[in-house]
Amino acid sequence: MIIDLTDTTSSEIASALLKARRNAGSPAMGMVGTIVVVVDEASHHDAMKAANEAGREHPSRVLVAILRPGRGASGLDAEVRVGEGIPGEAVLLRLHGELAKVPESVITPLLLPDSPVIVWWPGGGPRVPAEDPLGRLGRRRVTDAAATRRASVDYSARAEGYAPGDTDFAWTRLTPWRALMAAALDQYPTKVTGAEVAAARGNPSADLMAAWLQSRLKVPVEQRNSRGPGVTAVRLFTPSGQIALTRPDGAVATFSVPGQPDRPVALKRRTTSELLSEELRRLDPDDVYAKTLACMVERDAMPADAKKVAETARKSTAAKVTAAGQEVVAAKKPAAKKAAPAEKAAPAKKTAAKKSAAKKTAAKKAAGKKAVGRS
């Protein structure tokens, strides 16, 4: 059911939601939270679709707010959707004029009581999410650094203004990568001398991955550009060889551990709805993300040479042993060549000696026959 409301109020929208639920035969609310989506007109359709798909795992009331500030008259237009394949409820809100500057006055009356609120900015998000008027309503504030229109994200401001509940899809995209690298060190405990992250140029997930590795391993982490898509490789340099996770095609990765055969790993790039579903599963503060942001600020202040991994750290002990063995073999080759002529001469002498003995035997037999004939 779709109900269009023009020049309406929050109370009329709440009444329309109640009416739609009763007409659908479900007067009780079976929703676990409220998702507030702050988006522009151009991308509101994709954002609402992603929120509704995430709602299949977490039925929620989705409030999509399109802010249109300007000098025109203040107004509120709404579109209420219940049913039609929507697991919860969806409300599309268009705020005009001065009303767009105070969106919390419209959103607050529509929040589900006694349930968590998740605020999501698909287009990048504010500089400090916790200080945003709508961000203050949320228990969880989700931004997306990869969708920002700015050249880069101000991680210094994000770190200084961090509040429990802040997170970013650039960080969520790294969950399987971080899990696999942590599992590799659990199964193969060894000393890590350096690390490397390869990704497409300007990828914020690569910046966060490098900061996370540096904060956890306390080693230099070097970043390299690749053709993408996204993060293509993470390598840990150890005395025994590389622990590597490489994904050149964005779908299947290769997991390499020293002394073991390479293993394929399903590591496809996840959709927006899958990322949002992961954030809805946990509503507690992400302390690891906070520490990674602090390390990002430290890395920004570091000189470029301090972020590079030394060649001595890249070369493993196994490689050094192999190189030493090759040098020993190379040193032995000239001696073997010199000995070769002598070895070839020995069989020739033996053959000549055999021929000489055969001639002597034949001469003795001939002399014996002559003696018999004379007798």
Image (cartoon, helix red, strand yellow):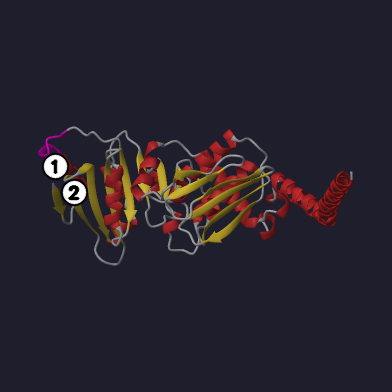
Say whether disc 2 or disc 1 marks the residue closer to the N-terminus: 1
Tell which of 99 and 247 is nearer to you. Answer: 247
Q: Is residue 94 left or right of residue 296?
A: left
Name the mark on residue 20.
Answer: 1
Q: Is residue 367 above or below residue 94?
A: above
Q: Position of residue 185 (x, y in %)?
A: 59, 37
Residue picked out by circle 2: 80
Q: CA distance from mark 2 to mark 1?
A: 8 Å
Estimate the x, y position of residue 196 in percent, counting from the top left: 60, 52
Instruction: Check residue 345 in the rendering and tell me which mark sits there, or answer none.
Output: none
Q: Residue at the spot x=31%, y=43% of the render?
A: 54
Q: Is residue 160 visible?
A: no
Q: From the viewer's perspective, is 201 left or right of 196? A: left
Q: Say which amino acid is labelled 2.
A: Val
Confirm whether residue 98 shows in the render.
yes
Callout 1: 10 Å neighbours few (<14), some, many (20+)?
Answer: many
Report the side of 71 relative to 240 (left or right): left
Question: In the rendered image, which quarter contains the C terminus?
Answer: top right
The boundaries of the magenta stretch are: 20-27
In contact (CB < 8 Å): disc 2 and disc 1: yes
In the image: residue 6, left or right of residue 121? left
Q: Label 1: state its secondary structure.
A: helix
Name which residue type carries label 1: Ala
Q: Is residue 28 magenta?
A: no
